[in-house]
Image (tube, helix red, strand yellow):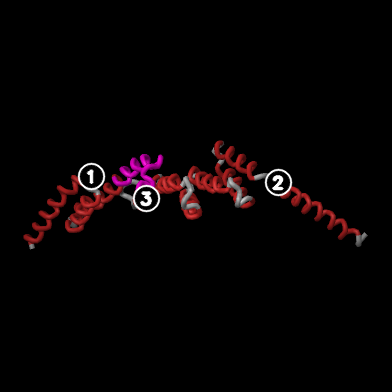
Amino acid sequence: MKKTAPFILAILLFSVSGCAWFQDSNEMEKSARELVNEGSAQFRDRDFKDAIRSFTTLKDWYPFSKFAILAELKIADAHYELEEYDEAIFAYQEFESLHPKNEAIPYMIYRTGLCWFDRIDTVDRDQKSSRKALAEFNRLIERFPDSSQAASAAKHIEHCVTSLAGHELYVARFYFKAKQYKAARKRFEYLFANYPDTREAKEALAQIDLCQQMIDQAETDK
């Protein structure tokens, strides 16, 4: 009886591992086309996490498949839809690095810009997202002015510029209220020089003269 125990244990272990092995084998039998169809259906159903898994499996199993590039694109888009913007940016930029001449590059640059654009906050907050989005949209228009995404990028640029100008105006006003007129004048001048076509620039121009008056008055009162 003592000798039969290890034998029975070995059979049980083989049965468990054998089932797992056969399961893995069955999974591996999915073709690249089946995986792309599966991932695409999941994406359409907005089941983005499962779509990422399906497309990632496709990339891992069939890296040289004609569907691999589509998988890379859809993985990036799925991250964007999940508002996983950092992961999406990484995926879009990796796609551009790996396939610099692919016809989807304008789309990739545009979507990278959107990842930043969707995170633009109010004018009293840091404007990193506005600057990053503006840079990507400008890059798109400079490189691909005739692309279908260029017109949409131009509209987003207006919002980025307005946000950046609004932030400069907010800071300049803060300095002015604090009676730090030299600092305020510097920010008003920067605003007018960099965003001259905005509504905020018109106010800045008037405030520059007022700041100078206050500076001169302070010098006179000394």
Asked whether, in this view, residue 33 is left or right of residue 3, the answer is: left
Q: Circle 1 sits in a helix, a strand or a loop, which is it?
A: loop
* Residue shown at 35% from the left, 51% from the top: 135
Q: Looking at the rendered structure, which numbered label has been put on residue 6? A: none
Measuring from the top left, give residue 181's x and y in whole percent.
17, 56
* Residue shown at 57% from the left, 39% from the top: 40
Is disc 3 surrounded by few (<14), some (14 to 19) or many (20+) residues within 10 Å? Answer: some
Q: Earlier in the sequence, mark 2 or mark 3?
A: 2
Q: Earlier in the sequence, mark 1 or mark 3?
A: 3
Measuring from the top left, give residue 73's x and y in whole percent.
52, 46
Cβ–Cβ below 8 Å for labels 2 and 3? no
Measuring from the top left, give residue 12's x and y in whole percent.
82, 54
Looking at the rendered image, the disc whose residue lies closer to the viewer, 2 or 1, is 2
Q: Residue 94 versus residue 53: which sits nearer the camera?
A: 94
Residue 184 picture quarter = bottom left
**How far apart are the alpha carbons under marks 1 and 3?**
20 Å
Residue that badge 2 annotates: 29
Q: Earlier in the sequence, mark 2 or mark 1?
A: 2
**How far apart are the alpha carbons under marks 2 and 1?**
60 Å
- Region rendered in magenta: 140-161
Q: Is residue 120 visible?
A: no
Residue 152 located within the stretch drawn in magenta? yes
Is disc 1 surrounded by few (<14), some (14 to 19) or many (20+) residues within 10 Å? Answer: few
Q: Looking at the rendered structure, which numbered label has been put on residue 197? A: 1
State whether the magenta stretch is mostly helix, strand or loop: helix
Q: Looking at the rendered structure, which numbered label has been put on residue 139? A: 3
Where the C terminus falls, by quadrant? bottom left
Looking at the rendered image, the disc whose residue lies closer to the viewer, 1 or 3, is 3
Measuring from the top left, give residue 110's x and y in whole percent.
41, 45
Asked whether, in this view, residue 15 is left or right of residue 177, the answer is: right
Q: Which amino acid does label 2 sit on?
A: Glu
Residue furthest to the right in view is 1
